[in-house]
Image (cartoon, helix red, strand yellow):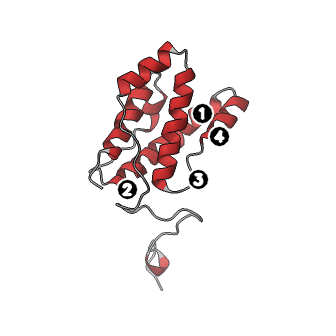
Amino acid sequence: MAPMGAFPQGGPMVPAGHPPAQPGQHGPKGQVKNPTTELVLGLVTCGFYQMYWIIRVLSEMQAFLQRDEPSWIKLMGLSFITCGFYGLYWQITRLGALVQEVQFRAGVPNPQNHGWMYIIPYYNVILLQQELNRAWQGPA
């Protein structure tokens, strides 16, 4: 009989299809980019480059994590259907944890989950790119 609050069989249950994150277990790293350049290009092109950039960033994260999440098709589709509300919800609830997992797997010391900071306009582009650059330049 396990003590109260203890996990039976030695650990917590992992959701189906998601292996536990391990440092060093990852796919190819993404490309290091200048966050300010990414923001300026998005502003100059009235947001069209921003859509291309988020597709590229989410694809890099997906390849690095070696799973189907984050899906840019799902994000863009549900955001379009909900007039952007799903995108805000996703940024608040999932993006910070995904970036933190990418950093953890890349061996970045003390990865942070910035959560709500990803919904601040303009700053979110710079923050996301800086945090991913830390992972892409990480030791692992």
- Depth-wise, is mark 1 or mark 2 nearer the camera? 2
Q: Is residue 12 above or below residue 115?
A: below
Sequence-wise first label, 1 or 3: 3
Q: Residues within 10 Å of mark 1 (few under 14, many from 20)?
A: many
- Depth-wise, is mark 4 or mark 1 nearer the camera? 4
Residue 1 horizontal/vertical position (percent): 48, 86
The residue type indicated by label 2 comes to Arg
Q: How many marks?
A: 4
Which image quadrant is residue 22 in? bottom left
Q: Residues within 10 Å of mark 2 (few under 14, many from 20)?
A: many
- Tell me the residue that label 1 is attached to: 87
> Residue at coordinates 40% horizontally, 62% vertically from top-left?
25
Name the mark on residue 37: none
- Tell me the residue that label 2 is attached to: 105
Q: CA distance from mark 3 to mark 2?
A: 16 Å
> Residue at coordinates 51% horizontally, 37% vertically from top-left?
56
The residue type indicated by label 1 comes to Gly
Q: CA distance from mark 4 to mark 1?
A: 12 Å
- Tell me the residue that label 4 is attached to: 73
